[in-house]
Amino acid sequence: MPHHVFSIDVEDWYQGIEIPMDQWDGFENRVEASMDHLLDLMACYDVTATCFVLGKVAEEHPNLVKRIHAAGHEIATHGYSHTKIYNLTPECFRRELRHSIDLLQDLTGEPVLGHRAPYFTITEDSLWALDVLAEEGIRYDSSIHPVLNWRYGIPDADRIPSKVDTPNGRQLLEVPVSTYPLPKVNVPCGGGAYLRIYPYWLQRTLLRRLEAREEHVGLYVHPWEVDPEHPNLDLPFRVSATHYWNLDSTLPKLERLFQDFSFQPYRDVFSDELGALAA
């Protein structure tokens, strides 16, 4: 049976709702308290995760990164400014990526192997980012979501982890979060808003069906999803509808998932594939 992966996109609540970075100073920082809840829960169930840390978070909360690393979790990059990749130039993306990697490696003393784009925004319009990732030493990516969404998605992308050739001929391991295939569409079931939207029985059923197909399960959450008390801003409906939906349910559902499934970081689950890629 394939091993399963749990990951956390480590960002503060206001960083994931498309507020420009130059306005962030006006909002309350809550990421450390939110991460404490996740770290405590994972420790209770012996879960280790990959934490895709936003560079701005690492810059402002270096001790948080050190605590996550000391607890045995993998530190990977979530970029720096939480800007959609297709809204960046290749030069700006490279600059932000390098800065984020340098911040994280200085704090942990270990190489950063993995990357996840904000909002999963490596799409058909930003496949050039794969070359930049490979050139900057990233070995695996988890940014291509094989679904159709107003922000992201390549619906016909490979659902299962696979090596991808970048436009300039390099290779990366692409490890998408979980989807369940139906005849004409992939059903997202890899966490985030979908974990909060689905009743637990449906979430568990989809993941068990993936297991029956001998596919790995890849789940993710954000720290703000376990913080129902974070400020409720007046946002466009399509943003607020998913951001604030059913936040009270996240921790109880995660606890049940940790009881029903076992999880490890990407670096451990895919160590053979990453080793072969390096060779």
Image (cartoon, helix red, strand yellow):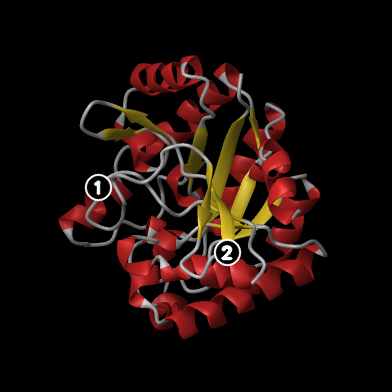
Quadrant of the image occupied by residue 143: bottom left
124 to 136, vertically: above or below: above
Q: Quadrant of the N terminus?
A: top right
- Taking the spot 72% from the left edge, 40% from the top edge, the residue there is 272
Q: Position of residue 151 (x, y in %)?
A: 27, 58
Tag on residue 148? 1
- Taking the spot 50% from the left edge, 37% from the top edge, the residue there is 219
Q: Nearer the viewer, mark 2 or mark 1?
A: 2
Q: Residues within 10 Å of mark 2 (few under 14, many from 20)?
A: some
Query: Between disc 2 and disc 1, whose residue precedes?
Result: 1
At label 1, the amino acid type is Leu
* Residue holding disc 2: 170
Q: Position of residue 193 (x, y in %)?
A: 35, 42
- Regarding mark 2 in the picture, which secondary structure is present there? loop
Q: Position of residue 231 (x, y in %)?
A: 36, 58
- Taking the spot 40% from the left edge, 70% from the top edge, the residue there is 85
Q: Is residue 268 left or right of residue 29?
A: right
256 to 238, vertically: above or below: above
Q: Is residue 244 visible?
A: yes
Q: Is residue 60 visible?
A: no
Count of marks overlaid on the render:
2
Front in this rendered view, residue 78 or 93: 93
7 to 167, vertically: above or below: above
Front in this rendered view, residue 245 or 192: 192
Q: Is residue 223 left or right of residue 191?
A: right
Front in this rendered view, residue 202 or 275: 275
Residue at the front extreme, as displayed:
169
Tag on residue 191? none
- Regarding mark 1 in the picture, which secondary structure is present there? loop
Q: Estimate the spatial distance between the alpha carbons at disc 2 and disc 1, rounded to whole Å.
A: 26 Å
Q: Residues within 10 Å of mark 1 (few under 14, many from 20)?
A: some
At label 2, the amino acid type is Arg
